Image (cartoon, grey):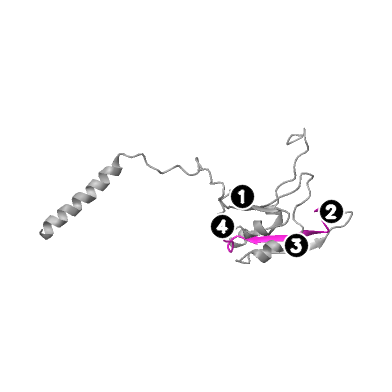
Amino acid sequence: MSDIAEDILGIAKGLLTTSKHLFRKPVTISYPEYKRPMFPRFKGRHRLLRYENGLERCIGCSLCAAACPAQAIYVEAAENTETERYSPGERYAKRYEINMLRCIFCGYCQEACPTQAIVLGHDYELADYERPDFIYTKERLLVPPPTPAGARAGE
């Protein structure tokens, strides 16, 4: 076969492939308006959970920081007092920070936590403009306390 015939055959194969996909429904979605559901095992933004009574689950043990291969977690523990009680144990996390620029979303912190205080949720929109905004503090990670039964927001 000559070079010209091979070129024409190659172009014909390419056009055949293109024509196969020409009438298919596109897979593109309008992202901000429609968000695809995440898989159940997807690991997104971290959250610090609370107990039903509003106390923090984190006891400041720093096992999550020890388990983190990227060294993205910093925990500073403090002692609970009778007047100021943040968690049911003796200690609580006075300072809890995750550097999201270093985090690789492996989930080892979630596996290492003895009280299931830290979980990786399904939130994947983590963009920001400044580098310091990627240091997630305890206040940013902690879920709000549960509202009392029967109470509505704004009352």
- Along the horizontal axis of the image, is 86 left or right of 13? right
Q: Position of residue 28 (x, y in %)?
A: 41, 44
Near-viewer residue (74 or 63): 63
Q: Is residue 144 magenta?
A: no
Which image quadrant is residue 71 in? bottom right
Q: Nearer the viewer, residue 83 or 14?
A: 14
Residue 121: which numbered mark, if any?
1
**Distance Cα–Cα, label 1 vs label 3:** 21 Å
136 or 38, which lies in front?
A: 38
Q: Which residues are magenta?
A: 84-104
Distance from the alpha carbon under mark 4 to that under mark 3: 32 Å
For residue 115, which quarter of the picture?
bottom right
Which residue is drawn at the image coordinates 78% and 46% (left, top)? 54
Badge 2 crowding class, 10 Å Cα cut-off, few under 14, some 14 to 19, many 20 or more, is: some
Which badge, 1 or 3, is on the more N-terminal residue?
A: 3
Q: Which residue is mark 2?
A: 85
Mark 1, secondary structure of its residue? loop
Marks 2/4: CA distance? Answer: 36 Å
| Mark 4 neighbour density, 10 Å: few (under 14) some (14–19) many (20 or more) | few
Which residue is the site of mark 3?
61
Helix, strand or loop under label 3: loop
How many numbered marks appear? 4
Whichever of labels 1 and 2 marks the residue nearer the N terminus, that label is 2
